[in-house]
Amino acid sequence: MKIICFSVLPVEKPYIEDWAQKNQVEVKILSEDLTSKTVDQVKGYDGVSSEGIAPVGEDVYATLEKNGIHQLAIRQVGYDNQDLAAAKKHGIVLTNVAAYSPRAIAEMGVTHALYLLRNVGLYQQRMAAGDFTFDEQTISTEIFNCTVGLIGAGHIGGASAQIYSALGARVLTYDPFYDASLEPFTTYVDLDTILTEADIISLHTPLLPSTKHIIDAAALHKMKPNALLINMARGELVDTAALIAALKNKEIAGAGLDTLADEGEFFGEQQDLSTLPQDYQELQALPNVLITPHVAFFTKLAVKNSMEIALNDAKNLINGGSSRNIIH
C-alpha cells in the first residue's frame, strides 16, 4: 500500500513517518498543496491525504478517479474548500478529522478572549510609546462576571463551554441540535439572546449557506458595547466590513480572530506587509483586535491526532472498509 500526503509542514513529518513505520505503509510526503498543478503526482499511489484552504476543483477529483484512487483523507475539520458534488460524481469518498483535538481550538478562543478582556493590546500599544499608566480606558472585568455566548455546540463549542464554565462564566449556547451532555456547562437559548446578552460571543459553527455572515451589521448592532467577538471557525461567518465599522464606531469592544474571509491570499506565507489586504491592515492596526493566522489547531497533540486519524481512514478505505469520519 502506498499513500501520498500533500501540504505537509516540517513539524508534521515525524508523525507521518512514525505512523508509516508502525503500519508498514509507504507514505510520500509533499509540502505542496493538492491542486490541479500537483495532482498528477498521485499516479502509482493507492490513497491521498491533504489539508489546507485552497479550493479543490473537479479536475482534481477526475485525476484521482483516473488513477484508481477513490478516497481523499482531509487532515482538518473544515471542508468548505472541497466540491462535494464533484467528489461524488467521480466516486471520491471524503473524510475529515472532526475531533482531532477540540480543546486546542477552544483554548485558543479563550486565550483571545482573555487577552481582549484584560486590554493587553491597549497596554502594549501604550507601553510601546512609553506610557505605563492605567485609567478608566483600561479597567477590565473578571471572566467569572461575564456571560459567554457560544454559536455552535459541536466538539469545539462543547469544549469551549466546559472551559468557560470552569472559569466561572455564565455560558449560553445557540445550536439547532441539542446535546444533553453539555447541560452541566451551558444553557441553550436562541440566537437573539446570545447577541443581546453575551459579553463574549464565540463562533464554532461550520460555514454553510445558512451561516455565512451570521455576524453581519444587524447582528453587531444587537451586541452590547462591551461585547467581544471571537472567531475560531471560518472567516466568512463574519461580514468583515461590518465588523471593522462596528469596531471603529465602538459598537462592540473588540475582536479575536484566528480566521479571516480572505485569509487564503496571505495566511501561511511570508508576506510583504505593504501588500496585505486593506481589511487586514485596518483590523491589525486596532489595539482591541487580536489576529492569529489560523493556528488555533496547531498543537503537538492535535497534529499527531489529525495525522493518525486521516491516515487510518485512508488505509481503511483503501482496504475496502469504512470510517465514521466520512463526509456526507
Image (spheres, helix red, strand yellow):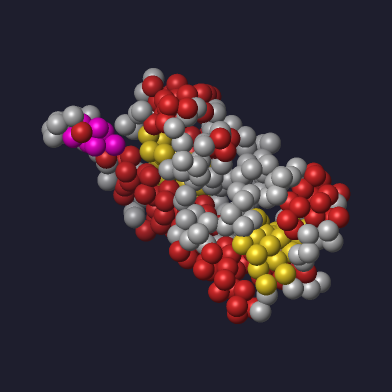
Q: Position of residue 204 (x, y in %)?
A: 54, 47
Tell which of 280 and 158 is nearer to you.
280
Does residue 124 belong to the magenta stretch? yes
Magenta segment, principal secondary structure?
helix
In the rendered image, the quadrant that contains the C terminus is bottom right
Task: Left or right? Give the position of 68 relative to 189.
Answer: right
The quadrant where residue 257 appears: top left
Does residue 194 belong to the magenta stretch? no
| Residue positioned 70% across, 66% down in the render | 3
**Residue 273, placed above or below residue 245:** below
In the rendered image, the quadrant that contains the N terminus is bottom right
Q: Position of residue 196 (x, y in %)?
A: 46, 33
| Residue positioned 33% across, 39% down in the render | 116
| Residue positioned 27% across, 46% down in the render | 142
**Residue 153, placed above or below residue 275:** below
Q: Position of residue 215 (x, y in %)?
A: 54, 32
| Residue positioned 34% across, 54% down in the render | 168
Q: Is residue 243 visible?
A: no
Magenta part of the chain? 121-127
Q: Is residue 172 visible?
A: yes
